[in-house]
Image (spheres, helix red, strand yellow):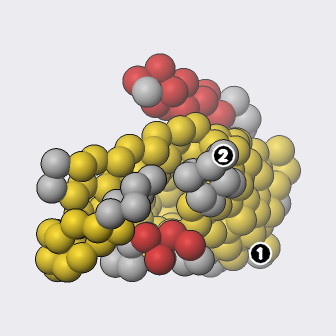
Amino acid sequence: MKKYIYAIALLTATTSTSFAQGLFSISYDIGLPVGNTSDFIGNASFRGFGIEGRGFITDNLSYGGSFSWAVFYEEFPAQEWNIEGETRTAYGRQFRYINSFPLMATMHYYFGAWDATRIYAGGGIGAQKIDQRLDFGMYQINRNKWRFGFAPEAGVLIPVNFNTNINLGVKYQYAVKAGDGHDAVSYLSFKIGLAFM
């Protein structure tokens, strides 16, 4: 995992300096599970962050790379559960976790001029490492796998000064199904951060 984090850090650093104008962003991310993911864990994630680098091809078009991390958790009260893969039930509490690590190549289009608030739309495509775990008494079921993923996004850059913008955005993170027992993972990610030019 460390080699992927180093690779994206290098990509974001070089991307933001490879053109005359670049942007580096850090953000606090809030995740809201949707689809099948919300059936496994319904709670929102307030433990997430993201880093991103973008280099501008023109004043209105950028490409770059991003890395983020979201942690989802939910505890279920003691009750009877069917044990996966077996024909018996057991009684107890369940603890469910999802750690999502999207690693994306990105492209964005910007509306308006740089001396004012700018709306942008775009997205990313790449890989997501999904670590999904269920703890139940002496049982633990792990589903850890790299998957293909994509993430359409829209946001706004609000100037604070010449070099700094507030970066607000919403992104739909989707990691495809990866074989039996590895359902697709999807969630909305709301980011609040700073973007430095």
Does 8 sit above or below residue 100? above
Instruction: Please give left or right for residue 139 compared with residue 85 in the image.
Output: left
The image shows residue 112, relative to residue 26, as above or below, that is below
Q: Residues within 10 Å of mark 2 (few under 14, many from 20)?
A: few
Q: Which one is in front, 179 or 162?
A: 179
Residue named by callout 2:
179
Front residue (pair 75, 48) = 75
Residue 54 visible somewhere in the drawing: no
Label 1: how many Cα within 10 Å (few below 14, some 14–19, many 20+): few
121 lies left or right of 131: right
* Residue 16: quadrant of the picture: top right
In this picture, residue 179 sits left or right of residue 165:
right
State the SS at label 2. loop
- In the picture, the quarter occupied by the N terminus is top left
Q: Residue furthest front?
A: 87
Numbered tag placed on residue 112 in the rendering: 1
Residue 120 place in picture, x, y as percent: 71, 70
Residue name at image x 75 percent, y 63 percent:
122
Q: How far apart are the alpha carbons under marks 1 and 2?
A: 44 Å
Q: Residue at x 74, y 69 (%)?
A: 121
SS for tag 1?
loop
Q: Position of residue 45 (x, y in %)?
A: 34, 69
Q: Residue furthest top?
A: 3
Please provide percent x and percent y for residue 76. Answer: 23, 75
The residue positioned 47% from the left and 20% from the top of the image is 3
Q: Residue at x 56, y 52 (%)?
A: 181
Amino acid at the residue labelled 1:
Gly
Which amino acid is tagged 2? Gly
- The location of residue 68, given as percent across then percent down, is 47, 50
Which quarter of the picture shows residue 64? top right
> Which numbered mark, 1 or 2, is in the foreground of this view?
2
